Amino acid sequence: MELQPIVPFEPVQEKVIPEGSEWVHQIKWDGVRVLTYCDGKEVRLYNRKKNERTLIFPELADASAYKADSFIIDGEVIALDTDGKPSFHEVMKRDGIRNSERARALVTAVPIFYMIFDLLYCNGEWINDHPFIERAHRLKQLVQGNDKIQVVPFFGDGKALFESAKKQKLEGIVSKKVDSPYLINGKNGNWKKIKKIEDLIAVIGGVIYRADRVNALLLGLYNQHGELVYIGHAGTGKLTDEDWGAVTQIADSLKSEERPFLNKPERVKTAQWLKPVLTVKVAFSEWTEGHVLRQPSIQAFVHLDPKQCRIEAVKS
């Protein structure tokens, strides 16, 4: 049977950690969502947009790491920074590559790890409608694992796990109902993500220069009318000097005389408008009353249709 890629189940964002025996909790990993498919003949990897990643992460296409003839598993691919913490910026050095030779060259330079948390299909049987706790136990039996592939454990005390995540500077936790099915191409409150810091993917509508070099990005999200709304600017984060040099070159090719934002950016004296085609992941502490990001920090550039960066999606 040829397995077709699916759109994975998504958690809803919450601020309160659910309590009770009907909930279990897992660490939320700051990486890229990847599902692994094995039809008994070959292993293939696809991201949440159903784009293939087998050649991008070749070290994960290892059928010997699993004790099943066929399966579909769900997890997060992560990479670590110099402090040994998961870094979205680092993993994008791998996920952003489109050349298979370059991808193979980065296997050693940028090591990645696969943190697996769910099993949807096993030995010819769809089990996505089975309770999460059953799928989790079957997943532990399925995965032999290796130094690159690990099963994410679950815990009963969500508050303690969240405090541990904060101390270890991890992104947060995901709380899951023990009896919840896996809703393909769905999203509901059976899974809840609680983050120690918020993040979103925004559209770059302009830049600020210092000495002919870009040193800040002007960010926006589209509203329900298709208008780009300014939400703040960011000049700090994880971009290197080399990254900022590349941004400067790209910005030069995207300059525009027309302001792309519906609203005029406040406290920005000089700005060069850009065609709104670039997207970037940004971490932030909260939204201000004026609907602007507080303490935004640039994490990495991502490949996403700018029109999918919508206000109602991130503030719901």
Image (cartoon, rainbow, N blue to C red):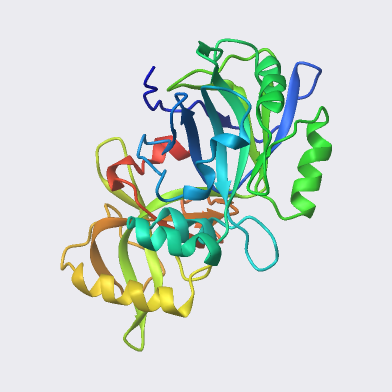
Residue placed at 68% from the left, 20% from the top?
138
Quadrant of image for the N terminus? top left
Residue 146: x %, y % from top left: 67, 44
Residue 51: x %, y % from top left: 35, 39
Q: Is residue 16 visible?
A: yes
Question: Which of the 4 image quadrants contains residue 23?
Answer: top right
Q: Tell me if residue 314 comes above or below residue 31 in the rendering.
A: above
Question: Which of the 4 image quadrants contains residue 25?
Answer: top right
Residue placed at 54% from the left, 40% from the top?
62
> Along the line of sight, which residue is nearer the eye, 310 or 188?
188
Q: Tell me if residue 265 comes above or below residue 113 in the rendering.
A: below
User: On the rendered structure, is 295 left or right of 228?
Assistant: right
Extreme-left residue of the structure: 257
Q: How many marks?
A: 0
User: On the rendered structure, is 100 left or right of 258?
Assistant: right
> Along the line of sight, which residue is nearer the eye, 69 or 301?
69
Residue 239: x %, y % from top left: 48, 70
Q: Tell me if residue 256 comes above or below residue 308 in the rendering.
A: below
> Along the line of sight, which residue is nearer the eye, 26 or 264?
26
User: On the rendered structure, is 172 left or right of 242?
Assistant: right
Residue 61: x %, y % from top left: 50, 41
Residue placed at 80% from the left, 19% from the top?
20
Q: Is residue 296 visible?
A: no
